[in-house]
Amino acid sequence: MVKKTQSIDGFILKRREGTSPDRGEKPVFLDSMTSAKLKPTTKHVKSKLEQKTAHALSQSNTLTTGVEASLRSLDFDAEEQADEAKQELQNIKSKPSRRERKAIRLKETKKKHRIRRIIKWFFIAVGAVLLAIIGWLSFKALTTGGKIFQGNVLDMFTSKTRLAEDENGRTNVLIFGTSGYSIEEDAWDGALLTDSIMVLSIDQDKHDAYMISLPRDLYVKHTCKKLLGTSAGKLNETYYCAYLDSNKDEETGAAALRKTAGKILGLDVQYYAHADWTALIKAVNAVGGVDVAVESVDQRGIYDRMTGLRLPNGVAHLDGEQALMFTRARGSLGGYGLPGGNFDREKNQQKVLAALQQKALNAGTLANPATVNSLLDALGDNFRTNFKTSEVQTLLDLAGNIKSNNIISLPLVGREDGESDLVTTGMLGSISIVRPVKGLYDYSDIINYVKRSISSDPVAREAAKIDVLNGSGQAGLAQKKADTLKEAGYNILKVTNAPTDTSDNVKIYQLNKGKADTASALEKRFDTKIIDGKLDGYSTSADFIIVFGVAAVE
């Protein structure tokens, strides 16, 4: 049924297209004339009808599309909700029961225990290996220590005894090497002669050290009944002579050499360390070689025909065999770069020992069991000493605290202080020897040089040169006073008569103001004021002149 459109007084209520008549839109009013004019024709009505039909179809399509979209959305939501429900159901089904949860926990606990057992046994195995290594090294140390050191081997681990000292608080060690590959085998003529001889003087508290090499050809007095039948000879014969005369007793041979070295240097030498060529080769190889400075006056470096060693100047890395050649090279059969002969060899021996000490005490070296084992093997059959087992820990501490570059060399020739050489070469009959410049068997200059070099006394270290003059007219007074001063550590240059006598007790003239410590000590010793300047009528190169007058005569 078609509902008729109502009109009031010529007004027609017109709805907006595409809207519902119930939505309360405002009416559009047309007067009767306009309504009459707009009366539609059949064609016009048809067109309008088509438009409305198309519009209705469009609206229908839109509605259909929206409905389909909504339905699809509903389907997707339904599917998603279904999946969630399905997953939840699976979760509920898969949730273990109490018995299953207990079994799972038990399984996990067993797994943890198994891992812990594996870790535990791993560390037990590692610990066992370490204990085995430590045990082996301890055994080697004990057996080796028994060969090298004197006393109960257990004292190496349980005691730490201070080393013996002289009256100046210094510990002096003779280090010497025999020229064979065995410490007890005279494999060839001269294999047990001491090719290298040096003394190391140590202060245990200040950790300073001085090293003095002694020429092997230095002519000395010694007893040599079986070997040569003489009472004097070269220093390198001293050990061997006493060794043979005592039926091959190591201690007796070493004691004879200690006594002779101490007499030359004016030192109480308490200890010795004796090594052979094998000990040097093995020790150097055990630490992986050593680095030494090759310092030759020849631009090519050094070449020694006897050993075949050829090295350029600069730092050289040496293995055991090369280190041995370096310590033996002296240019005796030609070559180049070793003009000092034995004196150059002595310097090179000190370089190798210092480098070996530094390398052997390196933290990485001591942490390597194989290296420690090799070092013990090197020392066991090829090293002897009179150090006690209770002193080993003290020795290790000192070796670690005294760095190789802090070991001061005191050469007897080519001294850095510019002073004259203290020994020289010469001939004694048909043999070539080394002797003190002062005279055969006269070691006084050497003793004074060593004493003032290692002394803690500033006067001794200044080594001021002093002339002692007799101004009393009494013969022998100046020499007597000079001897007393020399015993006190003063460096006496000349003893003679004064240009004129004086009635005073003593007059002191200072020519070198740089020797302040000596000046202060002399003023205090003689209770007098030092005079600055020269003594009229007297010429000297000394730093001080001391004139003893009539009042000094006792």
Image (cartoon, rainbow, N blue to C red):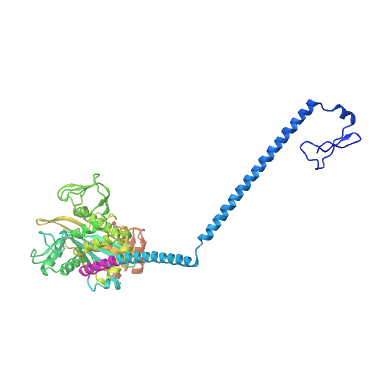
Which residue is farthest front? 1
Image coordinates for residue 105, horizontal then vertical, percent: 46, 66
Vertical placement of 426 versus 230: above or below?
Answer: above
* Foreground of the two, 450 or 134: 134
Q: Quadrant of residue 68?
A: top right
Q: Is residue 501 visible?
A: no
Q: Percent x, y for residue 413?
A: 23, 55
The one of 146 and 504 positioned closer to us in this rendering: 146
The residues colored magenta run 131-149
Residue visible at 14% across and 69% down in the picture: 249
| Principal secondary structure, stretch drawn in magenta | helix
Instruction: Check the picture and name the quadrant holding the C terminus.
Output: bottom left
Quarter residue 543 falls in: bottom left
Query: Which residue is rendered at x = 60% and y = 47% of the image?
Result: 76
Residue 55 in sight from this viewpoint: yes
Quadrant where the image shows the N terminus: top right
Determine if the magenta segment contains residue 442. no
Percent position (x, y) of residue 84? 57, 54
Instruction: Give the x, y percent position of residue 147.
Output: 20, 68
Q: Is residue 191 above or below residue 56?
A: below
Q: Is 5 located above or below residue 340 in the figure? A: above
Q: Nearer the viewer, residue 24 or 8?
A: 8
Depth check: give the residue in front, 269 or 492. Answer: 269
In the displayed structure, does residue 255 sit left or right of residue 354? left
**Res 135 → quadrant:** bottom left
